[in-house]
Image (spheres, rainbow, N blue to C red):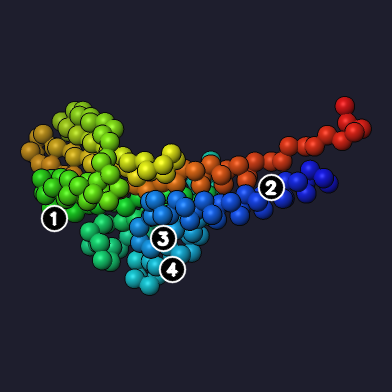
Amino acid sequence: MLHRILHFAACLMGLLWLGSASLHAQALLEPPFGLRWGDTPEKLIDWASRHSLDVNISLPGDQPALRVVRISPKSGKLPGTAAQSVEGRFHTGRLFEVTVNYRDPAATADEVETRFNKLKKALASEYGELVADRQDRSVKDQFATRSLSFHREPVKGLFLLLAYTEVEDQVRHSREATFSLLYRNDNLRQDLEKLLAPAAPVKGDGDK
């Protein structure tokens, strides 16, 4: 009984700490669309409903604590943005990651890359210079794929990642490109995982 009480108290203190930590993290790197770290899926779903957007909810079987909510319009872009979709990831019902996807079939690959570089410059102006992660190019079955990614981590465990992908059809001589912007609060995710961990039994005087 004692170890259950201690575990409950620890969970309560953890939730209180998460609240203050979330506010601190928000001040450093807020997720988009008016969301806040630790929000429930209902906030994102309600926003989608107000704008008549499609909602797709995924519950990975091998990760029972994870819920993925993807929002997209039937056509065109999300309201007031240049993005085609947004995806929120929730651990035990609390938001810890948001990915904004940019795809425009009507734009050329060069135009998309220009938009990517414009967003990268805007992010650097707001959060500081982004660090290059990797630049890859591969060719398979007459398709050449080029990818770039950059990140910024204002504090450890709280970061954004900007990634660009371009695919060239070497037979038809055509190119398509997309890019994504990911916001992630890994500190919150780790703290939520700790709250799920089973309480360690407390040995009494009579235990051996």
Per the rendering, the mark at residue 35 is 3
Q: CA distance from mark 3 to mark 2?
A: 27 Å
Corner quadrant of residue 16: bottom right
Callout 1 crowding tier (Cα within 10 Å): few <14, some 14–19, many ≥20: few
In percent of width and height, residue 207 lies at 88, 31
Query: Depth-wise, is mark 2 or mark 1 nearer the camera?
Result: 2
User: What's the residue at 32%, 41% (across, down)?
Assistant: 152
User: What's the residue at 26%, 34% (across, down)?
Assistant: 132
Q: Nearer the viewer, residue 155 or 171?
A: 155
Nearer-N-terminus badge (1/3): 3
Q: Which residue is mark 1?
A: 106
Q: Which residue is mark 2?
A: 10
The answer to whether 172 appears left or right of 48 in the picture is left
Callout 4 crowding tier (Cα within 10 Å): few <14, some 14–19, many ≥20: few
In this view, which residue lies farthest toward the right? 206
Residue type at the position of mark 4? Asp
Q: CA distance from mark 4 to mark 3?
A: 12 Å
Residue type at the position of mark 2? Ala
Q: Which residue is mark 4?
A: 46
User: What's the residue at 13%, 42% (across, down)?
Assistant: 175
Determine whether the residue tagged by mark 4 lies in a helix, strand or loop.
helix
Determine whether the residue tagged by mark 3 lies in a helix, strand or loop.
loop
